[in-house]
Image (cartoon, rainbow, N blue to C red):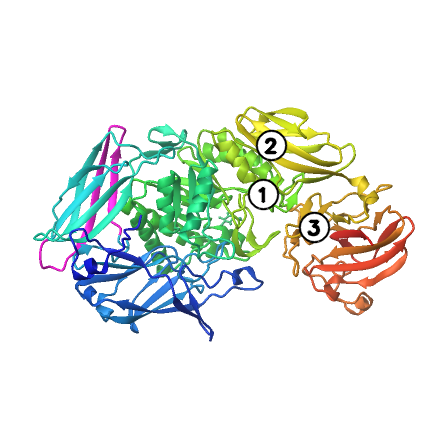
Amino acid sequence: MKIFKIILAGVLFVSFSTEAQRLVKTVNSGWKFQKENSEKIETVNIPHTWNSQDAFNEGDYFRGTGTYEKQVFIPKEWEAKSVFLKFEGANQHTQIFINDKPVGEHTGGYTAFIFELSEYLNFGEANQVRILVDNSHNQNIPPLEADFNFYGGIYRDVELIVTGKDHFKLEGEAAGNLLVKTPEVSEKLAKLNFSGEIVRSGKKNPKLEIKVTDPNGKLIKTLTPDIKNGSNFSVDFEIKAPLLWSPEQPHLYEITANLKDPDSGEIMDSYSTSFGCRWFKADPEKGFILNGKPIKLIGANRHQDFENMGNAVPNSIHRKDYQMIKDMGSNFIRTAHYPQDPDVYRICDELGLLVWTEVPVINDVTDTEAYHQNAIDMQREQILQLYNHPSIVFWGYMNEIFIRLVFTRDMSEADKNAKIKTSVELAEKLEAATKELDTSRLSVMALHENEIYNTSKIADIPDVIGWNLYFGWYTPGLENLGKFLDEQHNRYPERPLLISEYGPGSDSRIQTNEPKPWDFSEAYQLKSHVSYLNQIMERDYMLGMAAWNFADFGSSGRQDSRPYINQKGLVNFNREPKDIYHYYKARLNKEDYVYIAGKNFTTRFIDQNEKVKLKVFSNSKKVKLQIDDNIEKEAIVKDNIAEFDLNLEEGKHSIKAISGSADYHRNIEVKFRNNLIKNIQNKPIRINVGSHSDFVDEETGEIWISDQAFSENSFGYVSGEVFQQSKSKFQGTASNIKVTTKEPLYQTMREGLKSYKFDVPAGRYRISLLMAEPNRRASTENIYNLGSDQNKTSDEVRSFDILINGELAEQDLNLARDYGILQAVELNYEISTKDEINIQFNPESGKPILSGIKLEKL
Ligand code: GCB
């Protein structure tokens, strides 16, 4: 809750009435913005980033300085006040100038900072405010590198704050926060302390009055502590039988502190904060204990960006996200990998979400005093600014800090040891800084799956260890999760453990009944999350788990099935839920819930005798299915999924799932694959060649169906194999394919095929062949020059001829040479035929490839 009151000019400017308080107002609108080395000046509103678009284009996004400028009128009356400018966050180094005079600067992109402007201002006039923000890489500022975008700009609110000359201290690391501590809480009693600092004009001794209200808004106490040495105060108080804060009942108390003129009783400054009463611990055997009871922490990580906005998102989106996380049934959130908007923590307090918040010390450490100090400053700012939030239970300070080291080839032993040493030293300093400010919360660090964290002993430093584990994705075997955790638990029985990240990438355009790692199908995401949930639920010692990630997010270095986006979200970048989000809802919520999986899997292409597989998510024991209002089926629910194998006729079906008091309806259309040829008139066949998944084009609704081998009266490939880029990945290339929005269609392909055949009725047809050269090293040589180029092997030159019903359609087609690598190519041909279409692929060098094929009757 902001102390934002619209104060009538008369009241504000004539004098502060006894009801007056500080003025807090945003200064977000109408800034003139200019990027370094650019002529263009635009008018922008804050929140703003200059990377909302270019971080999603090919090449590097702009990292440099942006200048924001604005005239701000400062009333004459404020001469008698103190005037501050507060930034909730700007990425990542900020300098402030008022009327061309430097006021101050701040380093770090994710915490708030505040400056007193009074001495720089001309009162009764417009003042020029100029802000320089720089997001260029700086080896002394964390994060050095990470799997997300470092969008530059003033991407959180800017506020002007006006207080009396005597005021609660705003300047400094706490950015205006006063601390409410809860050193001892039980069901019977909460012992509390409220402390802070007052900045005084020195004329009179102000009086302090603190009002405490309970969660129902009832005043329960008014405290009037002394102000020590003229500036500090610390007051203890107790609440009997406190209403405890918990995810089920997030009761919030509130404090309002007023600083009063001793003679007139006028309020010179006022500050409010909410707080909660709860206690907790992390037990290495029993897991997380909140208010004396074990609670399995289940939830997600969350990045702060949104489609088309970058990190410049309004508070309403923060609220929507956390509401969705709460609605999913979670009780836990990790604000990976940095402190988020101050509103986020207020929202988590209100909704009842337990929070792990962390500073962005990620992947690597620079061995300089400046880097270490910046990291420590970030942690101090995070803790002091967010201290009062009952939702926060973990202060985190490092993520996978050895991953750069582990993946850097050619690093000498000496350099490795130096890197380990500086990282361990920094962890020790961060641990000390954390505990110096707050012993009531747990410190935590996230590790990737590697022994180095144990051998270096860095994992012994924090109170709790979070493992980021991607079994079944980066490393094989979903079932290895439990084994890995049990082994860690046995070796380090005193160490409380949780899973800080897990989950595969998915794309709601990719649908299959036979999910495989790296196919980006929604089905594999489901399979993986179910397995992880089961394995964690059966281990009492595990504190809990946070899925990676609540939403898809921008990461300019990524080339998955949607380029520049990390697709491990439970919801899309625009927060459209994926199947998996509904699964969590069914698994975690108590109220009856039912959902038929497959928003994009509503047309099923099957063989005549094949059954339609349907998955229904539910939190009941059984699910009933009503098909076309006349057939009823029932299935037992296991792991919150009821599986149905349905015999359905070709055509449209209405399906309703009922479980408990909840129901869900979906229309499903069935098409027999063999009839596709028969019905080809006006209904083109589209095949996702080299893939076991259907690709649903969300723009057109067209479906490119999974591939099949040729059989009589049907269609399909003859010989060849599914193209595999690397052993660990099961299909396709993970590289971005240029000039198309149907990347997955081109990423998967069949290699070395002899032909693709259709047993079609006589007629005239258009054939479209889709392909992309996946090999980055593919040669652009002409096959006929090979003999003269000693360096090239035929493996690197892919060249083939295409014959359609015996007629040469392409000779020496070298995609790399003719179109470029990783480039979407579509070749269309028209032919007339009496009974069949046989598209032959004859290699000249290397193996022919094909990504997709469309056959249309003209
Ligand atoms: C991790 C990182 C996270 C990445 C994630 C991934 O372990 O901590 O920043 O985004 O893996 O998707 O690879």
Name the element at disc 3: loop
- In this view, the mark in front (1 or 3): 3
Label 2 packing within 10 angstroms: few (<14), some (14-19), many (20+): many
Q: Residue at x 49, y 60 (%)?
A: 52
Q: Which residues are magenta?
A: 177-205
Looking at marks 2 and 1 on the same chain, the residue that comes earlier in the sequence is marked by 1
Q: Which residue is mark 3?
A: 748
Residue 33 screen position, x and y as percent: 42, 69
* Amino acid type at mark 1: Thr
Q: In whole angstroms, how far apart are the C-alphas of marks 2 and 3?
A: 29 Å
Residue 522: quarter of image: top right
Looking at marks 1 and 3 on the same chain, the residue that comes earlier in the sequence is marked by 1
Q: Is residue 264 left or right of residue 561?
A: left
Name the element at disc 1: loop
Numbered mark located on residue 475 in the image? 1
- In this view, the mark in front (2 or 1): 2
Numbered mark located on residue 616 in the image? 2
Q: Main secondary structure of the magenta part?
A: strand
| Number of marks drawn | 3
Q: In whole angstroms, how far apart are the C-alphas of marks 2 and 1?
A: 29 Å
Q: Is residue 222 above or below residue 97?
A: above
Residue 314 screen position, x and y as percent: 42, 54
Name the element at disc 2: strand
Q: Are marks 2 and 3 in contact (CB under 8 Å)?
A: no
Asked whether residue 192 is drawn in magenta, I would say yes
Residue 844 screen position, x and y as percent: 83, 60
